[in-house]
Image: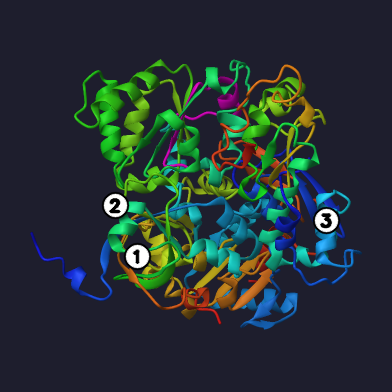
Amino acid sequence: MGIDIGKFLKNPEFEILITTYRDIFQVEALERDRFGEDYKKLSAVITMSKNDMQKMGFKSGDRVKLSNNYGSVVVEVKESKKNEPGGLAFMINSPWSNILISGETDGKGIPEFKHITAKISLSKEEITPVTEITFHK
Amino acid sequence: MFTCTGCALLCDDIEAIVENNRIKETRNTCRRGSARMKGAMFRLVPSIDQKPADFESSIKKAAEILRNSTSPMLFGLDNSTCEAQVKGIQLAKKINAIMDDTSSFCQGLLIEKILQKKLRTCSLDDIRNKADVLVYWGSDAQDSQPRHLSRFSYFPRGESRQRGYEEDRLAIAIDVRESNTAKICKGHFYRIPLKGDREFILALMEALSGKAPAYDTKNMLGLASILKKAEFGAIFVGIGLTYSIKNDFEILTELADMLPKFNIMPMVGHYNMRGFNEALFKETGFVNRVKFEGKAVHENKYAIIEALKNKSIDALVVVGSDPVLSLPRSVIAHLPSIPVVCIDPCQTFTSKIAAVNIPCAASGVESAGSAVRMDGKVIGLKKIIENNYLTDEDILKRLMEAV
Amino acid sequence: MVTVMEIYQLLPKTNCKKCGESTCMAFAVSLLGRKKKVVECTPLLEENFKAQKEKLESLLLPSAGAEETGMIVHTELCTGCGNCVVACPVDVANDPHGAGMGCAPTNDKVIFKVVDGKVLASNIKECRRFGKSKVLCYACIDPCPTGAIEFV
């Protein structure tokens, strides 16, 4: 048994595996106003199983920072309403998930949009504004 | 009746109530389609260097950018009519541009296999009339092509499926998550681990050939027996599956060979992505990633992802697409340093960094034309609202005259 | 059954009088009594009240004729996919070549229609849960993955 370092830190960090998906309500918001609050609210979210949330000490509505070699982003964490076995977290495909996508493609032109590994920890920062992701002012 | 451009189902049974030259109400569209047809809140306005400009100056400036470019790329056209796509290809040929579209990092590989007739396919009408076993694989049609199950696959009565879905049809979902589509497939949802599709296919092939696979033996034998009994089956391939097996596409061909009663249907998002693939295929023999240089050359380095990573393009024309929104942040870093010409009905993240913006009519609402449904059927688009916006086809034509 | 207070809580509560009533509470009473429509409250049509407006509409929907079968459509959950339109046995019987085949309804005898991307129920007396020979039918609930249709 190793020592659970996380226990002794104020803000433990966990490794997670994330996949992306599509959501009709988010696409509706995109069609209407991709710069708007609705689109951000529906996009800047990570959904996790009840078990994983408990294990990591998160509550629905907490803000979390996700980071890996490609970037970092602050989003809201939500507990999945479905009976998820855990071990896999979900983000709706959006500029927020795109921050974490590797550009490595083996020269084949298709990034790993549905396979993200990242570190996750509670964050006090605001949800990353879209302007920070997409260069525009 | 109008046609919805919300997704590649191109539902052509839509009613629209127009008031003050805007669509006030839609009937029969799904939630996605309704938002699409009503249009975005912020229209694109002509601009140069993010400052308002008149339309003519924007065209002139765009042409100047293309003239000064040694390696331009034309990207998008998946949300354009077939007529605009043909114009786009002509422009790319004229200026020796690289041409690519969203299918490059989406369903391009799959559509190529279908156009090359390496995978058996059928029409959505065949599915409605005949299909008894439906497999949604890495595809959440309920959220991406919301009327797929109600118009064509599971719920409607068809010629040889008159008794309703409970008796006549069986729907299966294979996915990494319990999507809305998987919920409908209730007792026939196979949850697989992320990137587990290849292993699942191999086990299924074993089961189909009569051996008991080590992987999830009981379920796999059950699934194989359902598939074997099918009279007319369809596998709806979503990007979940395409992304998962991308380096090993032959495995899908091999599975299809073992299932002679099944047809493969690419689940396409953008309303005319298949139209773009077909048009370019007809012209060059390739569905995307082409460079015109006298002849058409196809290479992976002409994929938008690779071209941006390698900084190998020095100007980008984007038509009806938003790469700044849809590409990985690590890939788009090169974009702000090259001149971008954005042609779109509405403001996008890409238009916010574009050197030139040229607004166009929203096809299927403000202009007519045709488009190719996900199954290859050509569907007409009608004009619902009358206004002065030029079509993207017209704009591409103007650009071609001006370069 | 929805109460006046539930309706009132979802209104802007500014007493702006644009609806013709003297207060938002009076408007809530009129809404409940079907004397006014939600859209007559013009501030509610603004973008920031969108969620409240949809909630109100879904709260008020059942009494629009559905209360006797107890059907409630939660518009805010509905994706407009039309599965219920096609799966409803009444719709199939009354419109076999339209709704029954997965297409847009071709007549007004169907129970379900999709308007603005959300389902709207009418002709509720045709519902199999209604009347003398009523049956406990689940045909519209089963194909709905978001739980947008409920019977209470």
Where does label 2 land, which residue?
A87
Q: Residue at x 62, y 52 (%)?
A: B86
Where does label 3 land, which residue?
C29
Left/right of residue B351 with respect to residue B217 in the rendered view: right
Quadrant, the N terminus of chain B: top right
Q: Is residue B97 above or below residue B86?
A: below
Of tags 1 and 2, the one toward the viewer is 2
Checking the image for residue B298, the label placed there is none
Where does label 1 land, which residue?
A103
State which region is magenta. B120-139
Q: Amino acid at mark 2?
A: Gly
Secondary structure type for disc 1:
loop
Number of marks present in the image shown: 3
Q: Is residue B118 magenta?
A: no
- Of all residues, the one furthest to the right in this rendering is C20
Task: Quadrant for residue A35, please give it.
Answer: bottom right
- Image position, residue C127 (x, y; %): 73, 26
Left/right of residue B62 with respect to residue C13 in the rendered view: left
Tag 2 and tag 3 share a subunit: no
Depth check: A113 or A122 in front?
A122
Q: Amino acid at mark 3?
A: Val
Quadrant, the C terminus of chain B: bottom right
Q: Amino acid at mark 1?
A: Gly
Tag 1 and tag 2 share a subunit: yes
Can residue B95 be seen here? The reply is no
